């Protein structure tokens, strides 16, 4: 197994995969700093982009983020800020003291919150990509109806993407199923960050709206988040290889 993994690592680290690697973040959705760093140690020869989500951030905080940055890794800080404009702006000013690559807020926080977020990042030492979360990939139309949103996921994503574009955000986080809608209402340079990526046969876990990497790329995804299908696999390197090959296939038809 070690020899096979070594061969895979050499393949995935080759220049042929440069663009595919640039398009992904591996989600460090684990419950401790030590587990996160062990995973990074295992994958870092190939992957330089990692997502730090809410559980890990609340356990390890900016200390872990600093550790990743010292390793010259790209960090997507997935904290989904959603509060009154002043509070969100303050949080972003604190985050933007560090050279993270991307951070997100909930687009449903409204125009004033999004505008305050944009202003806070623009006035900070570092300017991470600022993206707005639209509709979580765990939610369905029925979920939105039960919440009283009064519209479908597609229609709600459309409105939130328009608000993100209007307030100058760099992009949105959305399901691959809403990529066509986002592309309709935003500029070509707008980032479209897609979680809920699963190859056929892999468990969807709690994701309701999923899609394979190659199809998501062909539909216009600019960045993909790879989660438990890779990190909880019996062979994370082997699983990562399957996903990166699929990303590369999608890029060949982009």
Image (spheres, rainbow, N blue to C red):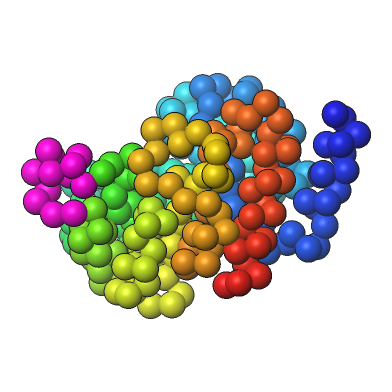
- Residue 80 visible in the snapshot: no
Query: Residue 167's x, y, as percent?
Result: 27, 68
Q: Is residue 94 magenta?
A: no
Task: Please identify the quarter of the rendering in which residue 157 is found.
Answer: bottom left
Relative to 113, is 31 on the left or the right?
right
Tally of numbered discs = 0
Q: Is residue 145 magenta?
A: yes
Q: Can you name the residue that lies furthest to the bottom here?
A: 187
Query: Residue 27's x, y, as percent?
Result: 54, 39
Q: Is residue 154 above or below residue 54?
A: below
- At a point 47% along the width and 24% down the height, the residue shown is 59
Q: Quadrant of the C terminus?
A: bottom right
Query: Residue 3's x, y, as percent?
Result: 91, 34
Q: Is residue 19 above or below residue 200?
A: below
Q: Can you name the residue that lies furthest to the front here?
A: 201
Relative to 188, is 41 on the left or the right?
right
State the residue in front, 140 or 133.
140
Task: Please identify the quarter of the rendering in which residue 251 is found.
Answer: bottom right
Q: Quadrant of the N terminus?
A: top right
- At a point 71% along the width and 46% down the height, the residue shown is 241
- Residue 220 visible in the snapshot: yes
- At a point 29% along the width and 64% down the height, the residue shown is 161
State the residue in front, 190 or 67.
190
Which range of residues does the magenta coloring cover? 141-152
- At a point 62% along the width and 23% down the height, the residue shown is 35
């Amino acid at each position: 197994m070690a020899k096979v993994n070594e061969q895979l690592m050499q393949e995935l680290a080759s220049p042929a995969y440069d663009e595919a690697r640039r398009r992904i973040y591996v989600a460090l959705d684990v419950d401790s700093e030590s587990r996160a760093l062990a995973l990074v140690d295992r994958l870092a020869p190939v992957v330089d982009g990692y997502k730090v989500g809410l559980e890990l951030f609340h356990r390890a905080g900016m200390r872990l983020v600093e550790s990743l940055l010292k390793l010259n890794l790209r960090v997507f800080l997935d904290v989904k800020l959603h509060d009154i404009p002043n509070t969100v702006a303050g949080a972003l000013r604190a985050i933007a003291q560090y050279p993270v690559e991307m951070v997100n807020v909930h687009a449903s926080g409204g125009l004033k919150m999004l505008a305050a977020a944009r202003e806070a990042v623009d006035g900070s030492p570092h300017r991470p990509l600022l993206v707005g979360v639209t509709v979580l990939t765990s939610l369905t139309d029925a979920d939105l109806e039960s919440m009283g949103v009064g519209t479908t996921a597609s229609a709600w994503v459309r409105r939130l993407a328009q608000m993100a574009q209007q307030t100058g955000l760099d992009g949105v986080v959305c399901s691959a199923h809403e990529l066509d809608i986002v592309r309709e209402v935003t500029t070509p340079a707008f980032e479209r960050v897609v979680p809920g990526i699963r190859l056929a046969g892999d468990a969807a876990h709690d994701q309701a709206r999923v899609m394979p990497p190659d199809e998501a790329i062909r539909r216009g995804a600019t960045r993909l988040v790879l989660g438990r299908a890779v990190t909880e696999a019996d062979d994370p390197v082997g699983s990562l290889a399957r996903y990166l090959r699929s990303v590369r296939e999608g890029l060949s038809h982009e």
